[in-house]
Amino acid sequence: MFNLEAYISFWAKKINSFLDDYLSFDETNKGLVESMRYSIFAGGKRLRPVIIYSSYGIFDSNFEKVTPFAAAVEMLHTYSLIHDDLPSMDNDNFRRGKPTNHKIYGEAVAILAGDALLTKAFELMLDRKINMDVEPEVMLDVAYNLAIASGEKGMISGQYLDVLGNMNEIKSTSTIEIIHNKKTAKLIAYSAEIGAILGYATDMDRENLKKFGEKIGYAFQIVDDILDIEAFDEILGKDTGKDKKLNKITYPAIYGLENSKKKATLLVEDAIDIISFYGDAATPLIEIAKYIITRSK
Amino acid sequence: MFNLEAYISFWAKKINSFLDDYLSFDETNKGLVESMRYSIFAGGKRLRPVIIYSSYGIFDSNFEKVTPFAAAVEMLHTYSLIHDDLPSMDNDNFRRGKPTNHKIYGEAVAILAGDALLTKAFELMLDRKINMDVEPEVMLDVAYNLAIASGEKGMISGQYLDVLGNMNEIKSTSTIEIIHNKKTAKLIAYSAEIGAILGYATDMDRENLKKFGEKIGYAFQIVDDILDIEAFDEILGKDTGKDKKLNKITYPAIYGLENSKKKATLLVEDAIDIISFYGDAATPLIEIAKYIITRSK
């Protein structure tokens, strides 16, 4: 029997231990790095790293070499949360039950901590000493695609559209799929894809894993928005019902809760179809996909 | 006779033309990319790109291959200006005589535009199609060192110390050299260094160019702070006298104007000494070094 909780916990420990060693400070940047570490160790589920390991596991088994890349993606994800929470963006006071970065360290340091985590994600992926088992061409491929997935045509443009939504500048509902796809799905799809790249998968396998990631990433965002409506503050650990207050364009806000749940379920079923071809090796990813629609936080 | 103005203008045109083509948008990110382009084309001197070309010119002459790297450094520099100008940081309303990014596009978009330019700088350096004449190992070397120079031990920690200064949390004057070195000199030193890397210079030459860049970078920041005190608003195109208002720890604030001018001159003389060894090939860099202490804006 596959135990998802134990599985996630196993990889989360690897990532946490790596990042704990990696994020060090000196006298001149102590407060800055403390702020970076605060958000890194604020209780994230490490979903993206676990997806990377799981995707990689379909193709190869030298998991040690994957850790720096998985840690880099987690740093990039964390920067995006710090910046998204800022007063000028979503103005969130809590995340995962804890005060957001700027509530503790102030806006200026929170912005710089985000900038530094973003920069550090690239530094880590491009470090030849740390990644000595990875060929330069593969390092370039993986780091270049991180920039594409998270840049002004990817994740950042999703957040940009979200911000326009906050400002009521988007009236059309046709953008909802674009926002979700870019804001959340791009980085999750990328995580599934680089597992394949690092495992020397064929172009077709790489494309399969990316599509799988896109679908569960879209489902993940829909479920997030459903939870925002349904969940209690205590369970989610952040201000709930907030999307409605901000007039955010979310899937449940447009199509209703029932249709949203159906849509998320369909996406996850599609995703599982794509990778069921890989048999038992795909079990972790399949269980992660199922978890995405059953989670309560 | 070497004409510095014409020389700078020649390379600036190359960079501007490249960036004009490179920074394109679609329907979903139009406003975001407009905001990125606004700051990119707000009249920057392109000093860092010109230093890269000039350093490279000592060792090799295939200047076309340098352009994407020079453009990437300019994007990274521009992101740092957008974020430094934000209300929670230096709260600047004008830069180079134009309203700062957040005054036009709002804080949220300005933060995202900065994030996107930072990400795009790495995307460009890591693009194998664009940089087909550059070996993967060299691309990694150059991009990795950009992360080091601009990250939480480099440029960002300089800005962090600057922010602490704004908040009056730094009382000691011994940090002034650290702040200047990190905030400004790191990226200028990096620019001089990667010219050498791209030109296949020896490790010793690479180190020389880096030291040259550190010294003119430090001088550049001292002169900036002198100009902040001396210059008129119209000449500099930004709010002057602002450092004093913010109680910023600057070289002239601590050591006075005369000592600051002497210090900047000494640094530039040292810098020129380091590269005079390269003879006529070093003329552009020597003229740039001299310009740094004679400029009025």
Image: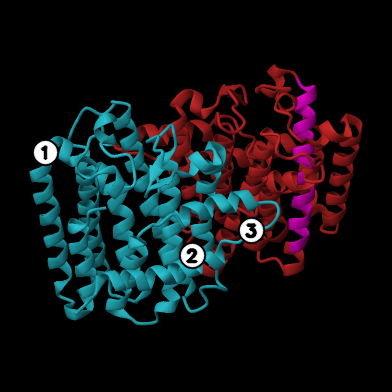
Chain colours: A cyan, B red
Number of residues whose C-alpha sits closer than 10 Å to that of mark 1, classed few (under 14), some (14–19) or many (20 or more):
few
The span from disc 3 to disc 2 (Cα, nearest Å) is: 19 Å
Residue nearest the viewer, comparing B94 with A168: A168
Residue nearest the viewer, comparing A47 with B66: A47
Q: Which residue is mark 2?
A: A125
Q: Position of residue B40 (x, y in %)?
A: 53, 35
Between disc 3 and disc 1, the foreground one is 3
Q: Position of residue B93 (x, y in %)?
A: 58, 23
> Does residue B2 appear anywhere in the picture?
no
Q: Residue at x 66, y 56 (%)?
A: B195
Q: Which residue is mark 1?
A: A255
Q: Earlier in the sequence, mark 3 or mark 1?
A: 3
For label 2, the SS is: helix
Q: Which residue is mark 3?
A: A25
The span from disc 3 to disc 1 (Cα, nearest Å) is: 48 Å
Q: Are marks 2 and 1 on the same chain?
A: yes
The residue under label 3 is which amino acid type?
A: Phe
Q: Residue at x 69, y 17 (%)?
A: B234
Is B229 covered by the magenta stretch?
yes
Chain letter of disc 3? A
Vertical placement of residue B20 versus A182, above or below: above
- Judged left or right of residue A254, residue B121 is right
> Does residue A100 appear anywhere in the picture?
yes
Q: Residue at x 62, y 49 (%)?
A: A31
- Judged left or right of residue B222, residue B73 is left
For label 1, the SS is: helix
